[in-house]
Amino acid sequence: MPMDAVDVVIVGSGAGGAPMALELGKAGFKVVVLEKGPWYKQDEFVHDEILNSRRNFFMPLPWDEPHLWRAGPDKPFSRTNEAWTANCVGGGTVHMSGFFYRLKPIDFRLKSELGAIKGANIADWPISYDELEPFYERAEEELGVSGNAVPHPFLEPRKKNYPLPPLAEHPVSLEIDKVCKSLGFHSIPTARAIATTPYKGRGTCVYCTLCGSYGCETGAKGSTLAALIPQAVATGNVEVRPRCMAVEVTVDEKSGNAKSVVYLDPEGVRQEQPAKVIVVSATAVESARLLLNSQSKRFPKGLANNNGLVGKNLLFSSFGQSKATFRVSKQKGTHPWLEAVAPFVNRSLQDFYVMPDERFGFRKGGTLGFMWAHPNPIFAAVGMARKGEPGIFGKALKDKLREYRDSRILEFEIYGEFLPTDDTTVAVDSNVKDKYGLPVAAITIKRHPLDLVMTRFLVERGEEVLAAMKPDRLDRVGTAGETAILQGGTCRFGKDELTSVLNKDCRAHQVKNLYVVDGSFMPTSGAVPITLTIVANSFRVAKGLVERMKKGGT
Amino acid sequence: MARQPPDATPEPSSELPPDADDPSRRVFVQRLTFMGGGVVLLGGGCKEAPKADAGAAPVTANRPQALTTSHLTFTNEDFAVMAAACERVLPKDEDPGALDANVPEYVDRILQTPQLENMKRNFVPGVAALDRRCQRMFKVGFAQATAEQQDEVLTIFKNSPETSGEARWYEMLVVLTLEGFLGDPTYGGNKGRVGWQLVGFTLVGDKTADPSKGYDGSKALMGLRCGTGKGC
């Protein structure tokens, strides 16, 4: 028995779903937000590594709700919890580190600027940086981004500085600045979605050091849970339903429009919520899965998928990393900053975001972000113990733990362009079902070789910076990874309905009242963490939708 | 302890079932990825857990021995073996070891959480297998063996083929020991925060981040169940 229809149902309450809920609620439309995870209160965010990082507080268990993952179409799938983000109200913004970068104008027209790349399905975006710029400003304002937009050769156009002053930095940041200057690089402050002063009723950062992988117990982190959902609910028009798992989006067979979202409520009972407009924002992997699982006579291959593009051109972020270890007891004389205690480094390099020519084999590069190694001790210790032949236990392991106590580990991460390929996709596997009985997402990754050339180059540049600081050890973690919590591409937007799933308003070409507003819309990945871009785009899409709905449209 | 049944296969035998794409046994999975904090899940789901098996009744793994226990998961004999193994992973030296930190207590308690139901089914028989291997090699039970003998048996488990039951069991042992040594003390381990002192982790308790009074990690875990709100 369907419930009474509302104006809009939104599946997901993270970076994409929450801005839509806020804007639609403010405009007076009745909104229901379905969120598969629980609605945590701030005081449930405790610094317990076992609870937060090693069990199903945020991420589902891989045997309850697996993703299937394989490195290429000729490889076997294995079950994993890879490519999930937090399952809770606020989604991935709750456990993010909050590195908030904007894209750059070239990211919107990569193909036009750099030309086609063999084996990569890159496409220009149907909007420009200038069209998104006001919404970047709005997103930074709403979430409370702190930082300092210093002029540098690679700075994207922006009208204002960040709304909040930057976080206090560890003295190592100035050391990085010095080294970068001597190498001819431009180290720039990293903006963070972390409130440095009381902001919109939220608490300020207490420099607790446990940001990424944790929820913020003061509300300083600009999650949608802390920053947007309370505002949305306060409009009186938005109802958030936690622990509700979307099963399918149904279709009116006559009109071909989306009709309702069928979901399992917290008791596991099947419910149906009809709406005039349906917005899907469950991450690029899970949104594709929901659409592919929504099969009907009109859409036998899944909703909005009659051209077979849903789930294609999956994007992550190219990842590489190296770590510099400084032994405090040996180096405190020459490196007095080693004894300072402060969590934030907040330095980035974008000197290699776009290469001026082909001499290194690639043109589109990425961003390096410098930070202290995450302090989670179990995670660190398990990494030291390892397994198999090189694994250690006993005194050898304890010596490592003692060495760790005497170490400060400075590292960088790469956020590199991730080229879309034919064989990097999300499908559904009807033979493997999750605990709800729904076919799970099956992810195939076939990396473009240029990604690996590029990431290696960036890692080598980062290592030059670390090496110049004279650490005791410099360890390369890897150059061929992907950051699977940063997802896009599976419902790319574009002008041509034969080559894209969504139009420039992020509405499905084939379904006139269906929107997708997580990272799925992006035809190219950009080369920064994309959370801010998802939030900004969602504010942009919401503005258009509100205008159309006020005129009686969708 | 009663005499062990004779072994059907010669050394080195694999008496624990191999890994058949069972993620609950791949506890070392740490892909090259971005969240330095390491969202690394471990343990077993509660989906197929038979209710009769989920209670406090110790699993005896077909070992002919008395069903006496003062523990939640292990018989007294298995507990002693497991505790000895934990202590070899993190032995006491100039700094406290696994026993000082109450790690065996942690392992016994954490295996009662629903998330680790599958792991319990895999881990408990492995304790018996470790003991039998030690018996075969040195004619003495693991808990009574010398440290050198214990290390030799553990090394065999460690260096077994990656997907073998022995290698998986070793991984579980190490990860559970490190969790018990370095996890929140409310789970029963890390007694007196000796683990955190050893690695210089001082971030919990000196800021607002200290879990509030009355916080109990095990209870918080129990509250998560499988996330459906419906039980499993």
Image (cartoon, coloured by chain):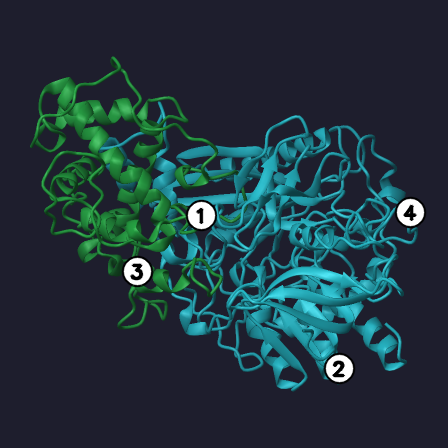
Chain colours: A cyan, B green
Q: Amino acid at mark 3?
A: Ser
x and y percentages locating residue B44 in the rendered image: 39, 46
Q: Please tell me whether mark 2 sits on a helix, a strand or a loop.
A: loop
Q: Is residue A236 visible?
A: yes
Residue at which label 2 appears: A29
Q: In screen coordinates, is A293 left or right of A173? A: right
Near-viewer residue (B154 or B56): B56
User: What amino acid type is highlighted by mark number 2?
Assistant: Phe
Which x, y percent locates residue A452? 66, 31
Q: Which residue is mark 4?
A: A498
Q: Kindly identify which chain the residue marked by label 3 belongs to.
A: B
Q: Are marks 1 and 2 in contact (CB under 8 Å)?
A: no
Do the residues under discs 4 and 3 have CB atoms within 8 angstroms? no
Comes first in the chain, label 4 or label 2: 2
Residue A366: percent from left, percent from top = 68, 43
Provide the secondary structure element on which disc 4 rests: loop
Front of the two marks 1 and 2: 2
Graded by Cα atoms within 10 Å as few (under 14), some (14 to 19) or many (20 or more), the crowding at tag 2 reads many
Q: CA distance from mark 3 to mark 1?
A: 27 Å
Q: Is mark 3 in CB contact (under 8 Å) with mark 1?
A: no
Quarter of the view holding residue B4: top left
Q: Whole-Å distance between the Cαs marked 4 and 3?
A: 53 Å
- Distance CA(mark 1)–CA(mark 2): 45 Å
Which is in the foreground here, disc 4 or disc 1? 4
The residue located at (41%, 41%) in the rendering is: B24
| Sequence order check, earlier mark of 4 and 1 | 1
Q: Are marks 4 and 2 in contact (CB under 8 Å)?
A: no
Residue at the image position 68 percent from the left and 33 percent from the top: A447
Q: Categorize mark 3 by other alpha carbons within 10 Å: few (<14), some (14-19), many (20+).
A: some
Q: Which residue is mark 3?
A: B218
Task: Name the residue that disc number 1 marks.
Answer: A373
Look at the numbered discs 4 and 1 and tell me whether their residues touch, using CB distance below 8 Å: no
